[in-house]
Image (spheres, helix red, strand yellow):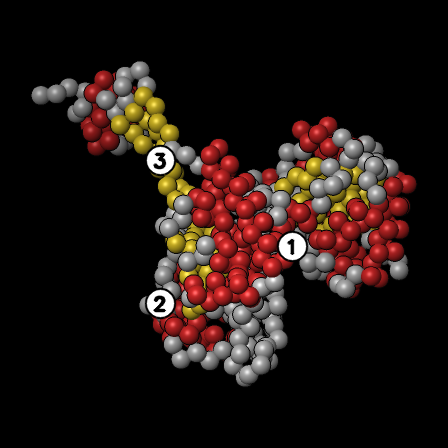
Amino acid sequence: MSIGIRQLNTRDPAFETEFQRVRHWSAETDDAIEQRVAAILADVRLRGDAALLEYTRRFDGLAAATMAELEIGQGELQAALAAIPSAQRQALEFAADRIRSYHQRQLEACGRSWQYRDDDGSLLGQKVTPLDRVGIYVPGGKAAYPSSLLMNAVPAKVAGVGEIVMVVPTPVAGSVATGGTGAPLESAGAGAQKAVRNTLVLAAAAVAGVDRVFTIGGAQAVAALAYGTATVPAVDKITGPGNAYVASAKRRVFGTVGIDMIAGPSEILVLADGSAPADWVAMDLFSQAEHDELAQSILLCADAGYIAEVLAAMERLLPGMPRRDVIRASLEGRGALIHTRSMEEACDISNRIAPEHLEVSSADPHRWEPRLRHAGAIFLGAFTSESLGDYCAGPNHVLPTSGTARFSSPLGVYDFQKRSSVIEVSEAGARKLGPVAAELAYGEGLQAHARAAELRLTRD
């Protein structure tokens, strides 16, 4: 099965033009979505729970009379944990332990308060405190990602967040989400009003220690978290993935609350020296392409023969993939196999792309790692498949996309904390700093600032 993926060569005079076409992705928003989201946010802010009940009925087909029917209690979370197969429970708990251990080290490295006194006895420092309440958006029904729940909730808990509020849409049979939640999400269970409550997601919420869970989704759920209603408490920050409506809503409420990021399509870039089996690299490229048609998979390699082996492996393996049509569309639309002059040049190109996931498929990955400056996550060595990072390696899988790894970082403990400066100036320090502050304040025309500093230079 032939795959029409781009094959580029850095020696080609037209390479730069073709390379820019590979990199291009438009993040332009849909005006219709933006208008609908704006209306939903305004309505939820005005009518609160009544609007949530209406939109949940309209978009998810779930006719609840009260908000109490849309909240899942701790008993049901624990029941879900007890109900899943033991292998799934063990996998959830193993992954959660790995994620918790990694983020605990992150807390110890960068999440602590500190203070010092300078020569004049003034105290200076930084006070690190967790956010009081965080909201986590989790896709619902068949589009269920317990791994994303763990990646969002566990570091929040490690950071010391006081309360985690989770929202998850639970559409019913035949419901078509045409406004708040976007495309149809799931099939229903038995009964006209049987909501899809994904047991594995609820079990993950129990493992992660989520405090409250509401079966609402879409832009209306984001609005409830941002503004608060009579039932849903307002949060300080909203994290977690969602569709175009959710992304638009998060963008619009930023400033009222914090958000993690507005993520683009998933990406993987593989730097290969030809030492790993071609099938491994081919499947790693598939692992991102299967997300959706806009996902991007790129191979950089200085060995033309190896690139041919990888392409042959892709064409051989593709027919056996359940999501082969999505994979093919992704590879042919945004994928590329790039023949470079050297691994050094491949590293330079990688830095220009700043990929979400960067695999260094090399016999000596630590030789190349120091050259790699921009990536959401770096996976070293042939045995380190990106999929392990998605589920259970420990580091967070919520990563910057679309080149934003040039200035952004993975989700972490620091996203659930804030820092306050601590200043205590001694009398000697006031005499030392006062003239400097006054001089600068007069220069800015701010006399009260200057006088406030000067009054402390002497005591009457």
Q: Is residue 413 visible?
A: yes
Where 419 falls versus 310 (above or below)?
A: above
Q: Which residue extends farthest top?
A: 119
Q: Is residue 226 left or right of residue 412?
A: left
- Residue 247 rendering spot, x and y as whole percentages: 53, 59
Q: Nearer the viewer, mark 2 or mark 1?
A: 2
How crowded pointer 2 is (Cα within 10 Å; few <14, some 14-19, many 20+) is rated as some
What residue is drawn where x is 84% and y is 38%? 274
Q: Identify which amino acid the numbered label 1 is placed on.
A: Pro
Left or right: residue 127 compared with residue 275: left
> Where residue 54 appears, x then y in whole percent?
44, 77
Q: Earlier in the sequence, mark 2 or mark 3?
A: 3
Give how far across and how far down residue 186 sits, in percent.
Answer: 61, 72
Looking at marks 2 and 1 on the same chain, the residue that comes earlier in the sequence is marked by 2
Give the distance between the C-alpha atoms of the residues marked 3 and 1, in whole angstroms. 36 Å
Label 3 SS: strand
Residue at the disc numbered 3: 127
Q: Nearer the viewer, mark 3 or mark 1?
A: 3
Q: Which mark is residue 265?
A: 1
Front residue of this view, candidates 263 and 145:
145
Residue 305 falls in image quadrant? top right
- Tell me whether circle 2 and circle 3 mark residues in contact (CB < 8 Å): no
**Based on the displayed image, in which of its 4 quarters is residue 409 positioned?**
top right
In the image shown, does 395 or 95 lie closer to the viewer? 95
> In 3D space, how far apart are the residues under numbered discs 2 and 1 (Cα atoms)?
34 Å
Under mark 2, the amino acid is: Thr
Give how far apart the Cα atoms at labels 2 and 3 are: 32 Å
Q: Quadrant of the N terminus?
A: bottom right
Residue of label 2: 231
What's the residue type where badge 3 is placed? Lys
